[in-house]
Image: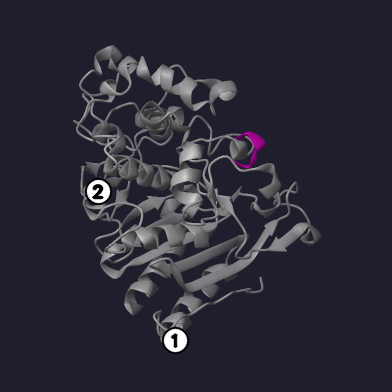
């Protein structure tokens, strides 16, 4: 596959040897790719390096379409962020906390009275945001007809009993995190998560990020596809807990078909995984979060949101975790490279978006080719090269 790259440098950016190193790593992974990818690095809202390469199929085609249906990945190419969307929700939560509209120590029921059912009256906002509430799947499953209705699913979760005493264990709430966060946001603002992404992030900072993609932008959206060996929860060996994982994801990543390419997904405001954007936009956002005087919120609010609120081995997936208030934090696996502190959020299939606040750096790796976590070194290698430069 030919390499197509766009590279931007600034006087305050990386030295030329650094660009060459990053270029080589990007080119190596692109040569092995079946689709396309982008890696962008920003400092304080300004680009330091931009790499784009490979292809995506045109809107309405499939990954198996002929070369005539393919187009080059460019700076305008958008892709589904999957759980990178949770980083947007964490940022919204931090802004609402900063504006005294949300208190992480307060009970969820103080904002959302119905949530007190089934013994959850003492659950705190922080326990929801730090993945310790114990509501890892929806029971009963909402089915395809309601899966994208945030408020309908939140009502089911409000009546549901947790699997453990909230706060006692940490486990990634793959889909339920979004339903819970969206309802909390609605209760304190009266707005949907898509409206909040637009009003608090996309519009004021001119970011090409969407939760609920307008039809007019469909042509810029990369078609996602899974590699032949794609799998989820690759750390998990226990067959009984694998059943829980199946309920958690409800076929959204590994089921028949590709719901992540559906019109329903891109129009929905699915707060756990439906965000859509460019690598440039995500890198710019995180770089502005990483600055000492972030324009998004006070330093205190960001420090609190990126402090460790939960950590340990995932009670379901056996993966080491560290969470702030919705943000993933640097972990023993080196998810965010060899730099600490770090925060952000990864996405299914290999996407990774985050910040190194000690270096004022924001980065984003975005792709349409989903690889299993235990086989994917794309983002790790790029971040390793970046760390050697900055």
User: Where are the magenta residues, as a range?
Assistant: 259-264
Q: Is mark 1 on a helix, strand or loop?
A: helix
Q: Is residue 72 left or right of residue 244?
A: right
Residue at the far right in the pictured view: 68
The image shows residue 118, relative to residue 13, as above or below, that is: above
Residue drawn where x is 36% and y is 70% of the image: 384
Question: Residue 318 location, x and y as percent?
Answer: 30, 41
- The answer to which of 88 and 143 lies nearer the viewer is 88
The residue at which mark 1 appears reads as: 16
The image shows residue 163, relative to residue 275, as above or below, that is: above
Is residue 40 highlighted in magenta? no
Residue at the far bottom in the pictured view: 16
Residue drawn where x is 48% and y is 27% of the image: 150
The residue at which mark 2 appears reads as: 301
Count residues near mark 2 (Cα–Cα under 10 Å), then give few for <14, some for 14-19, many for 20+: some
Q: Is residue 19 left or right of residue 31?
A: left
Is residue 376 at all visible to an observer of this figure?
no
**Residue 356 is drawn in which quadrant?**
bottom left
| Nearer mark to the viewer, of 2 and 1 | 2
Count residues near mark 1 (Cα–Cα under 10 Å), then give few for <14, some for 14-19, many for 20+: few
Count of numbered labels shown in the rendering: 2
Question: Residue 364 location, x and y as percent?
Answer: 45, 61
Q: Is residue 204 left or right of residue 124?
A: right
Question: Residue 92 location, x and y as percent?
Answer: 38, 43
- The answer to which of 70 and 270 lies nearer the viewer is 270
**Residue 220 is drawn in which quadrant?**
bottom right
Magenta residues, dominant SS class:
helix
């Amino acid at each position: 596959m030919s390499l197509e790259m766009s590279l931007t440098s600034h006087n305050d950016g990386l030295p030329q040897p650094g660009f060459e190193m990053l270029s080589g790593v990007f080119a190596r992974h692109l040569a092995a790719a079946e689709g396309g990818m982008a890696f962008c690095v920003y400092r304080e809202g300004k680009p330091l390096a931009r790499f784009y390469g490979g292809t995506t199929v045109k809107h309405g085609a499939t990954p198996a379409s002929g070369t005539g249906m393919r187009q080059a990945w460019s700076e305008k190419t958008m892709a589904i962020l999957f759980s990178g969307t949770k980083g947007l929700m964490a940022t919204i939560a931090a802004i609402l906390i900063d504006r005294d509209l949300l208190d992480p120590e307060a009970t969820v029921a103080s904002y959302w009275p119905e949530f007190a059912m089934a013994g959850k009256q003492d659950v705190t906002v922080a326990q929801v945001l730090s993945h310790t509430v114990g509501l890892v799947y929806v029971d009963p499953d909402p089915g395809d007809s309601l899966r994208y209705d945030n408020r309908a699913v939140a009502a089911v979760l409000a009546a549901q009993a947790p699997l453990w005493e909230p706060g006692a264990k940490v486990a990634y709430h793959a889909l339920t995190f979004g339903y819970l966060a969206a309802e909390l946001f609605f209760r304190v603002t009266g707005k949907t998560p898509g409206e909040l992404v637009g009003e608090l992030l996309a519009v004021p900072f001119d970011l090409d990020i969407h939760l609920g993609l307008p039809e007019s932008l469909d042509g810029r959206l990369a078609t996602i596809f899974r590699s032949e060996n794609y799998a989820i929860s690759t750390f998990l060996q226990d067959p009984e807990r694998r059943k829980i994982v199946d309920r958690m994801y409800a076929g959204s990543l590994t089921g028949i078909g590709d719901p992540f390419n559906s019109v329903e997904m891109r129009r929905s405001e699915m707060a756990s995984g439906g965000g859509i954007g460019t690598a440039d936009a995500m890198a710019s956002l995180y770089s502005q979060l990483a600055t000492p005087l972030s324009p998004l919120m006070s330093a205190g609010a960001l420090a609190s949101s990126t402090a460790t609120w939960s950590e340990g081995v995932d009670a379901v997936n056996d993966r080491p975790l560290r969470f702030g208030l919705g943000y993933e934090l640097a972990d023993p696996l080196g998810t965010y490279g060899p730099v600490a502190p770090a925060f952000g959020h990864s996405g299914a299939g290999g996407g990774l978006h985050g910040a190194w606040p000690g270096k004022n750096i924001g980065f984003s790796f975005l792709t349409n080719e989903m690889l299993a976590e235990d086989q994917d070194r794309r983002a790790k290698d790029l971040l390793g090269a970046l760390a050697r430069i900055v």
